[in-house]
Image: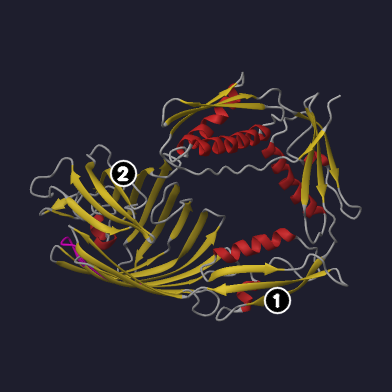
Amino acid sequence: MQALKLISIPLMLFYMTASQAYKVQTDILVEANAKMQEHFKDFKKEMELNNQKIKSMREIEEKTKIEKELMTQLLHAQGYYAATIDTKIYQISKTNVKVNFFINPKQSFTISHIYLQTGKEIRAPDINVLDIKVNDLLLAQKVLDSEKTLSKKVEEFNCLANINISHQAVLDFKAHTAELYFKVADSPQVVWGKTYIQGLKTIKEKYVYRDITWEEGECFKPSKIKKFRSKMLLKPVFADATVQYSDTPINTNQIPITIELTEKVHRTIRLGAGYHSDKGPGFYGSWEHRNFFGMAELLKFESTVNQRLQNLKTTYTDLFMGNRNQSLIIQSELKHEDTNKYESSSWSSSANIRKRMNKHWSFQYGIGHYLTQVRELSKTENFGLLYLPVNLSFDSRNNILDPAKGLYFKFESAPYWDLFDTSTIFYKSRVDANHYWALNESNYTIWAARCALGSIAGSSRALIPADLRFYAGGGQSVRGYEYQSLGRLVDNEAQGGRSLIELSTEIRQKITDTYGFVIFLDGGNIFDQKIPDFSLPIRWAAGFGLRYFTSFGPLRFDVGMPIRKREGIDDSYQIYISIGQSY
């Protein structure tokens, strides 16, 4: 009878080096197993990619041995422990070499028994909670997934200082079966001891204690430490976070915890510049303090100056308003706009509560006021508006300035009351949705799409302040048309409207890690009615752009051109230069 062999399920790491001089062609032939032939497709591509800088036959032979070992590990990971691999190297010419791998997977191994071994003091979970079952194929990933599941269940039923789980498989090569053993290492049952915080300079200790989910004397759970450290590293005020403890308590079953934190620099100054052919040169500056009162509060001043807009905006954010998933946001803004269609000077302020429902969803509500003086068509009006904004958003983008994948959705709405003319009441709502698809694994080709819909119900267009109506056209709207130039015109100047539609699709292609280009199609229009009138034409524009990628985001240069130019109104093209993608 063939002897049983004790093995450990392999964890695979593929790493290969690349060279040149010899041209090496690789063929992998798998006998009567289409599934494994498919598995080796990507492996073959990786091999050929790394076979471009081979300098000698000796190097080819050494590399072939390494690749054979990696193939063996891949076969084992899929349950083929009796597989054989034969190799043959052919030197076709002086610099052309062919390497053939002949693989016979043979029969895959299944699991005949599963055993769980633990110490006497450890309360063991039921073996049925594991991801892998008797008669399943012996797949490496399923075994590792079962280890993770077992680790969670052991922690749930115990108070272990350290959870260490290992596995072994005993193979029967005659029956092509395996006995699978999971072993939970001995560890004392302990409780949380005192928690000590070190390294803080300007941040108050109670800010850290807010995120500590354990209490002295409670059952010890190591996973709580991992979750706590992850939270600290995600906070904008910490550069590093370590948690130290001993898993062998002396004379007591309590484990003291030492938290070592390193603070980031809390103040930042940002300066930026851009150019839009419809707005001229523009400048942006901001100053922010991310720990204003010692509890990671954010105070930010920012200003934008260009030919059309000058503003000064202040934002205060308390990230912990009652609980860790709720923030207080207070904003105030002084703004002056001169768009050729209207000129306005305004002061607005608002206070909002933002609730983070989960990783992606958030909901915001509040109260605000908007005082504005608007001069439009030689008529000057004053408005004093009270509004109640609500905002629902979803954000799964992987990067705000240069997203490669994910979805961004935002719905915002507010009723407005004019305190100077109580008969004026209107409701302004807008929905934005952006989606990003990576068309290859390298994220070098991105397809982006955007849609926006807006509506103002209640008062007529004439009673709505000009600076609160909807406008379209420009670098963040419909590229190719002048800033706020779409919709109904009076003396060739857009007057804004009560509803809006904007559409865009864009292909973003990286050439290298530093340079790239885009091609895009934008469309949109403004309507007098509260609902977009789809019988009226959408104004379309197409264009292209260049991208220069930096550590702080891409630099953007776009050229947009109207597809059907309005004579005497639209220019042949518009140019946009700024930081970040268009959306």
The residue located at (63%, 42%) in the rendering is: 12
Q: Which residue is mark 2?
A: 503
Q: CA distance from mark 2 to mark 1?
A: 54 Å
Q: Where residue 18 appears, x then y in whole percent?
A: 47, 43
Q: Nearer the viewer, residue 169 or 101?
A: 101
Q: Nearer the viewer, residue 158 or 21?
A: 21
Residue 421, quarter of picture:
bottom left
What stretch of residues is rendered in magenta? 333-343
Contact between marks 2 and 1 (CB within 8 A): the answer is no
Which of the labelled discs sits on residue 246, or is there none? none
Kind of element beneath mark 1: strand
Q: Is residue 288 above or below residue 60?
A: below
Extreme residue in the right direction: 120
Q: Amino acid at mark 1?
A: Tyr
Residue 277, quarter of picture:
bottom left
- State which quarter of the image contains the N terminus: top right
The residue located at (63%, 36%) in the rendering is: 69
Residue 458, quarter of picture:
bottom left
Q: Which residue is mark 1?
A: 196
The residue located at (83%, 26%) in the rendering is: 2
- Figure coloring: secondary structure
Q: Where residue 482 appears, x then y in whole percent?
A: 18, 53
Q: Nearer the viewer, residue 290 or 348?
A: 290
Q: Amino acid at mark 2?
A: Leu
Q: Is residue 265 visible?
A: yes
Q: Residues within 10 Å of mark 1 (few under 14, many from 20)?
A: few
- In the image, 297: left or right of 217? left
* Main secondary structure of the magenta stretch: strand
Q: Residues within 10 Å of mark 2 (few under 14, many from 20)?
A: many
Is 147 in the magenta? Answer: no
Extreme residue in the left direction: 568
Q: Where residue 126 appears, x then y in whole percent?
A: 83, 43
